[in-house]
Image (cartoon, rainbow, N blue to C red):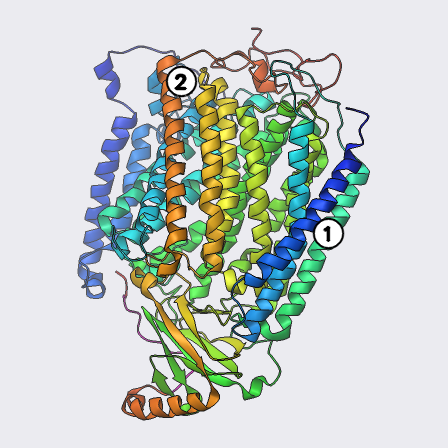
Amino acid sequence: MDNVNHFRRLAIIWFFVSVIATLLVVLLLAPILPPGNGSVEASGQVVDNTVLLGVSTPVATAVLVYFIYALIVFRERDPTAVVDGPPIRGHSTIQTWWLVVTTGTVLFLAGYGTIRLLADGAGGGQGPSPIATPVHANSALQVQVIAQQWKFTYRWPGYGGMETPRLELPASRLIEFHVTSLDVIHSFWAYQLGVKADANPGYDNIAYVTTKGPQTFNIHCAELCGVFHGYMFETGKVVPQSQFAVWIAQQRRQYAPGTKALPPYSKQYFPQPQRLGG
Amino acid sequence: MTAIAIPAHRQPAWRRLLGFNLLTGIVLAIVGWLLGNVIGNAIHAPSLAFFSEEAGENDIAVLLGYLFGVIGFLVGLGFANYPVRRLLGHPATLAEHESEGEGVGRYFTLCTDHKVVAIQYLGGIGVFFLVGGLNAMLIRTELLQPNVHVFGANQYLTLVGMHGAMMMGMMTSGVLGPFANWVVPLMLGTRRMAFPRIESFTFWLLMAAGVVLITTIFFGGFQTGWTGYQPLGDQGTAGYDAYIGFFALVGISMCLLGFNLLATIIAMRAPGMTWSRLPIFVWAVLATAILMMLAAPMLIAALSMGAFDRTVQTAFYVAGNGGSSYLFQNLFWVFGHPEVYIVALPGFGIVLELLPVFARKPLWGYRLAVAGMLGVALLSFFVWQHHLFVSGINADLRPFYMFSTELISLPTGFIFLCAMGTLWRGRIRLTVPMLFCLAWAFNFLFGGISGVFLSDVPSDVSTHGSFFSMAHFHYTIMGGLIFTVFAAVYYWGPKMTGFKFDERLAKIHFWSLFIAFNSTFGPLFALGLLGQPRRVVTYPSHLQALNDWVSASAFVIGLSMLVFIVNLIWSQFIKREPAEDNPWHSKSAEFQLPTPVPVHDFDRIPVFDADPYPYGVEPAGGPALAPTGSGA
């Protein structure tokens, strides 16, 4: 058994297993990966997930193949025997190569992630002064998402600062979400759009998304916000631009009395804390 | 200062109930609780009643009650005796039950024998681990259906919070409490820890903390999960005070435990136990101890500010009054991320300590393994904002935190490389502890790989706060810590108690746990990707099939733990088959001592002339420990 070149054998097994596994994962698993194709950012996240899967599958197969091989080949057959193995205490070449390869992988992942993040913000919340803005961010449709226990409402600064209980968005349009909260920390998660941004009281959290075709999408609160956190979900819609124009005009008429009673539009609101302690 | 041992004088049983013991501790805890309440109500009634008309609750009274109750408990156990005696000018004594022989009573008192404290930890943490596990079973029962059907939303969130807090709080000391306390002095060749009273103190404080957390159910529970985010916590009923009290006490206990172990490892090594001969488990304990000491104070500070917000109307976390909800998140995760490595690192140590024994080879890449552990410990302080990737704070620092988080995979990779190198051409024996170690490698591999997705910001946007991240940390923490704790239980357990475990039951336990664990948490990755947020009591009905599968698997985990309990009771209390001195043919120092290990460990302090892994070196089977101290 000692004459076998275990290392070469392992490398060959790993090569074939990892090529097959990576192909299977990238070709079969990646296309069905969430959040799907609902927005430019969501598609981008699927691409990122695919790249990460493609990088991590060979690593995972290397470790798994090694352990399975070692357990089969290096296993003590005689359960009563207490025989020592060779006193190998390290191998500087292997250690160096391991360090080089893992460092390279990490640098690649961090670099790739940074480039992808800075391109358009990837749908994540990035605070009041975003650095990762998509092109034409100035012409984005602004929607303020106001979270409170336990619902989301939406204010439209471009439409007289009215507040609607439902969210409809025009198709193929860049949207600028301003996410804030009136009480505790929430998180605005539009699943199919690939948007997630925490809502903090007194803070404006901006996230960009570019919608694609008409669809419905799920909105969930993704940060524990109290007893009815589990009930804080609803459905939003992406509709054709003409239909959106009709809808928003209708909403504006319907909520005109309410708009007058609202405080003026602001990036954040400071209501009295509900419980003053004691 | 010379310690004077007081000779044991036996008293009748009823007489021994009086004095400083657990009974007195419980009585004084109740007295302290009542006293705190009285004082709290006296302070509160005239001045602050204005602010809390709604609930009829008085957070000051509750928190003072906990404070005085815990102080009373510790005084009753006798922790004040030594400092008071010294203050009054009396000589120091070592009367803390070491001299009273080997009675069962020692396990219910302040005892300074590190082996007794270790068993206390094992039993005490075990009980709270069961409570936390039971909570998990109840959570999965509720999630059998998409809508509320067993518990209300409030009860459900309290269960979630108690499960999380119990596991993250009590199990933090799950390795260092029982195993490091027991084995580190033996590995170092010393008879005790550097600070034996503090060692006992950390244990009893932890027990008090656990009880404080359980009392939350009398005050309406808490709705914040184990992270206790503010200002949500500020809204909570007095149940949140229990959370504050619990985690602050755990923080103190952790900090002192780390401090004690660090001092022991630095100052108490026997002759010849140089840094390069330190067993790798001791290095892991050292790295963890540093993390504990540095991270826990942050938690205590964060919670204290929360307590001030709730009682004396400060506004650390109240937006609009000058505070910020981000402050708590930052402080919590500055503690919280090192915390998960506090939980994971001892597991690395156990695996690398056990693999040489069962592969019959020296540890491969000793210095690389040490570098890995210290590297993880160092880096863990620079990654915390990956918990806040979508929160909007410091958005321009996200590339840095992405990089630092991914960087942690380098030292973690060292641990894997050393594990793999140790198996290379070894003579691997698949004993039960070895099976648990190998399961660690499998689980932690998937935990680590899924972490890559969470550390990448674009990918994290879709997975943050979902069941995906929940599955990720259960793979790393349950798959990493709990599996290695069981490896340690089966490996060191018989040596600690003196009685063997039933091997067939142990194998059933392992295989059922390993399969059910993966069957439970594997599908949770899918559930998260399909859009189920964490900590929800309801979910979309098309996810029910997967959720039911997960719940069924979780119940199998519960059954698997029952098998372990049956094994524990059967083999340790009923059948009691004496364990051999060195059942694993280990060359580590503790296995060169007789079983059970004598009260004073070594007759003579040993001298070390090699590291603990001289496998494959002639003469075969020679122990690392030059004179086996006991002479047995």
Residue type marked 1: Thr
Q: Position of residue B593 (x, y in %)?
A: 56, 13
Residue type marked 2: Ser
**Residue ID for mark 2:** B571
Mark 2 belongs to which subunit? Answer: B
Residue at 66% in and 15% down: B623
Rounded to the nearest whole Å, what is the CA distance between mark 2 and mark 1? 48 Å
Q: Nearer the viewer, residue A65 or B248?
A: A65
Quick check: marks 2 and 1 in contact, CB under 8 Å? no
Give the extent of the magenta segment.
Answer: A265-275
Helix, strand or loop under label 1:
helix
Residue at 72% in and 35% down: B367
Q: Within 10 Å of the Cα at label 2, are there few (<14), some (14-19), or many (20+) other Cα atoms? A: many
**Residue ID for mark 1:** A103
**Magenta stretch: residue B127 in it?**
no
Q: Position of residue B412 (x, y in %)?
A: 64, 44
Q: Where is residue B235 in the image (x, y as percent from the top left)?
A: 30, 62
